[in-house]
Image: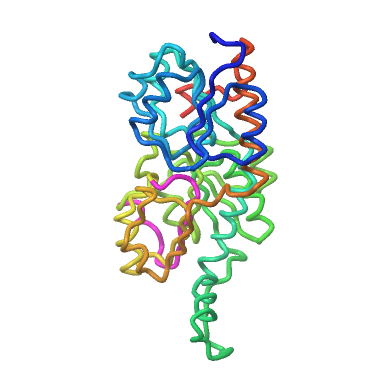
Amino acid sequence: MPHSKPLVIVTRKLPDPVETRMMELFQTRLNLCDAPMSQDQLAAAMREADVLVPTVTDRIDAALIEQAGERLKLIASFGTGVDHIDLRAAKARHITITNTPGVLTEDTADMTMALILAVPRRIVEGSALIRTGTWTGWSPTGMLGHRIHGKRLGIVGMGRIGTAVARRARGFGLSVHYHNRRRVHPELEEELEATYWDNLDQMVGRMDILSINCPHTPATYHLMNRRRLGLMQPHAYIVNTARGEVIDESALVEVLREKRIAGAGLDVYEHEPQVNPELLALDNAVLLPHMGSATIEGRRDMGERVIVNIRSFADGHTPPDRVVETMF
């Protein structure tokens, strides 16, 4: 890099301790107002920066990368997913991409488990009764939901987060099933008492709860399409804390509205930040604002990973969290 301290441009407001440390270590340009950059602003930043620190809200496509200046050699993304970056175009321009894997595992798994509990037990509906003053007292048939103990949980994507969800699920008495590109190590399978399904269709049709924990890639786009959603049992629930694009949202609305599945818990959406208005009208959908990783500890850990990646790269070393296109 051309400077002893690389010019680092950050696209969104990060936690104060992270920004302070970046200011100490690098020539850093912060986004204090936290408004997402426009494509023109991103292009201008990429023409000037040595390092760009974007987030999932920044779409860095091939056209944008083509406009990058010669100085830009590292895109150190603040987040785990990299589906917002065209990895192939970056590779062609010899731009290294890093992310922040691992630091959000426990937080996202906690939120997944919270939705697994919230949807069958109708927690949001119950809270609304209290807040609207429409609760008339306890009743033997009031607010009946479903027990999760003893039910079958199907995990789609048994990576770090999927595994962490499985560990929590065992504590709640759920039977763990999973579908993954590759079967996990036998010792882990034994620890989790997990059943592997090579055929996703077969697993989907037999689960009581389905948890989406795989990344968004061309191979997983609309993995849960209309046909697969149609395989779910009428009493089954689906939870998604991964990426909205993995589920065909219009098809999901249809099966929820027609009660062909019992409910859904969503923290992510296909067209974020827009949420399908038809989803908002459904009382069998628990909807959260992409907050699965939103803990103070998690955000600080993410920032520390970004800093480590930048420092390693600036020192001429391979960053520990370098993303290779074939990984996704």
Residue 112 lies left or right of residue 276; in this view the side is right
Please provide percent x and percent y for residue 266: 46, 56
The quadrant in which residue 185 appears is: top right
Q: Please say whether residue 165 is visible from this viewpoint.
A: no
* Residue 182: image location, x then y, percent: 52, 33
Q: Is residue 232 magenta?
A: yes
Q: Give the extent of the magenta segment.
A: 227-244
277 or 182, nearer to the observer:
277
The picture places residue 50, in percent across and down from the top left corner, at 50, 17
Q: Is residue 261 magenta?
A: no
Q: Is residue 136 visible?
A: yes
Residue at x 55% of width, y 71% of height: 123
Residue 145, percent from left and from top: 52, 75
Residue at 46%, 32% (x, y): give it.
82
Q: Please name whichever residue, 320 or 113, is drawn nearer the observer in this view of the structure.
A: 320
Quarter of the image with the N terminus in it: top right
For residue 45, what is the image quadrant? top left
- Between residue 108 and residue 184, name the one nearer to us: 108
